[in-house]
Image (cartoon, rainbow, N blue to C red):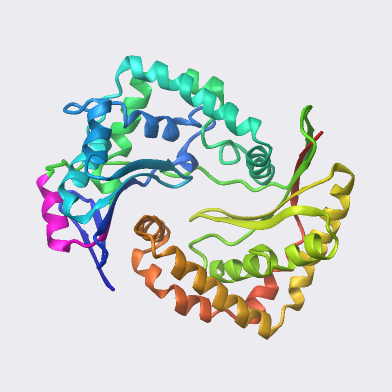
Amino acid sequence: MEFKKKVLKNGLTVLFEKRDVPVTTVMLAAKYGAAYESQEEKGMAHFMEHLCFKGTSKRTVKEIVDEVEKVGGDLNAFTHEEVTAYHVKLPSEHLNIAMDVIFDIFFNATFPEEEVKKEASVICEEIKMYRDNPHMHTIENIKSNLYESPFGDFIAGSQENVRGMNREILFEKHKRMYVPSNSILCVVGNNEFDEVVKIAESMNIEQGSVGAEIPEVVKKIAKSQEQREGIHQTNLAIGFHFPCSSDKERYAAEIFSTILGQGMSSKLFSEVREKRGLVYGVKTDLDLGKKYGYMIIWAGTDPEKKSQVIDISLEEFSKMSQVTNKELATAKVQVIGNRNVESEGSNDTAVSLVMEEISGKAEDYYDYEKNINAVTLEEVRELAKIKEYSIFSLGP
């Protein structure tokens, strides 16, 4: 494995991992996401992500996609709490195409007026889609029961917010946030670092200034439920405040979540599904950022069994204080194995490197196994002492 990192004169951070497989992922990320938004702005980062694909000063919407797809590539993007990232995956020999297209849509998007209005409607349909999906709706609402606005609000915002945003507001925000000093370029593939740097420098993107800060993330504890006609199962989420990605305890959190609810060998799956037959699906999910962290227990169950599932899940959480050295050792192998399997894909590795750079430094990605193996039994058991939790359920 070969990893290199450089900050260019214009402030752009370049991360690079050399691979032997002839496939490359090029990712360009702005250190700006939904967590940076006020309540009135909520949905802006996601809206800008959509608009960056709607044409530049030298490419139409069709030309952006065609140029990547005609060489077998795939172009996409995502909006996270702390980052908005655009990525191309394609044969390594076409690195120039990937770099040129992704730099163009990232820095030179024009946000045509007619596209802003049209895309607002598209995003509103996306918001409806999330609400209509019981699982997605439950995950979004447990977050709002764990955090006050604006952080607790839906990343895509509300329909009212989205329809209230015009081109001038969005374009000005884009110009301030999408600047080299606030951006990370990550390339993972069968190329050379010098070549990546040379192409990036040839783009002649001028340095800009950025002053965005994440508003205070305010925790809360709340319990609520929602009823909806036309569904037959209750979707349930129990949420706990957990360490942030910048905390040393993040590695203990990953092990804790794995033992409790990751996979068919987990405590929750064994106890709630296999032993009692109360659910089809039950699992834990972690979302750890630089300034926030939470773990969710999710389950889908019969409405009449909801209380029983909650009680057993909380009991299993509490019993993590009795985790054994054997369970810890087994979980470490599982967590490290999961990371190794995920890292096979250049896209997943690029995402991980970018997120590590935001939380601290990208180099920490390569210390993952060491940091997982350094977790002690006491650190895992300590998390079981968390007593406060939020609940959200959606049922018939």
Residue 371, compared with residue 189, is above or below; it is: below
Q: Where residue 245 appears, x then y in whole percent? A: 50, 61
- Picture quadrant where residue 212 is located: top left
Magenta highlight on residue 240: no
Magenta highlight on residue 191: yes
User: Which quarter of the rendering shows the N terminus?
Assistant: bottom left
Residue found at x 23% / y 25%: 60
Drawn side of residue 128 relative to residue 199, left or right: right
Q: Where residue 177 appears, x then y in whole percent? A: 32, 38
Drawn side of residue 328 relative to residue 19, left or right: right
Residue 366, compared with residue 238, is above or below; it is: below
Can residue 223 be seen here? The reply is: no
Q: Where residue 168 appears, x then y in whole percent? A: 33, 20
- Picture quadrant where residue 317 is located: bottom right
Residue found at x 41% / y 59%: 352
Q: Total marks drawn?
A: 0
User: Toward the viewer: 296 or 176?
Assistant: 296
User: Which quarter of the rendering shows the C terminus?
Assistant: top right
Residue found at x 55% / y 20%: 160
User: Toward the viewer: 248 or 2?
Assistant: 2
Drawn side of residue 102 relative to residue 246, left or right: left
- Picture quadrant where residue 395 is located: top right
Can residue 306 be seen here? The reply is: yes
- Magenta segment, which residues? 186-202
Drawn side of residue 193 relative to residue 377, left or right: left
Residue 326, compared with residue 116, is above or below; it is: below
Q: Where residue 344 appears, x then y in whole percent? A: 39, 65
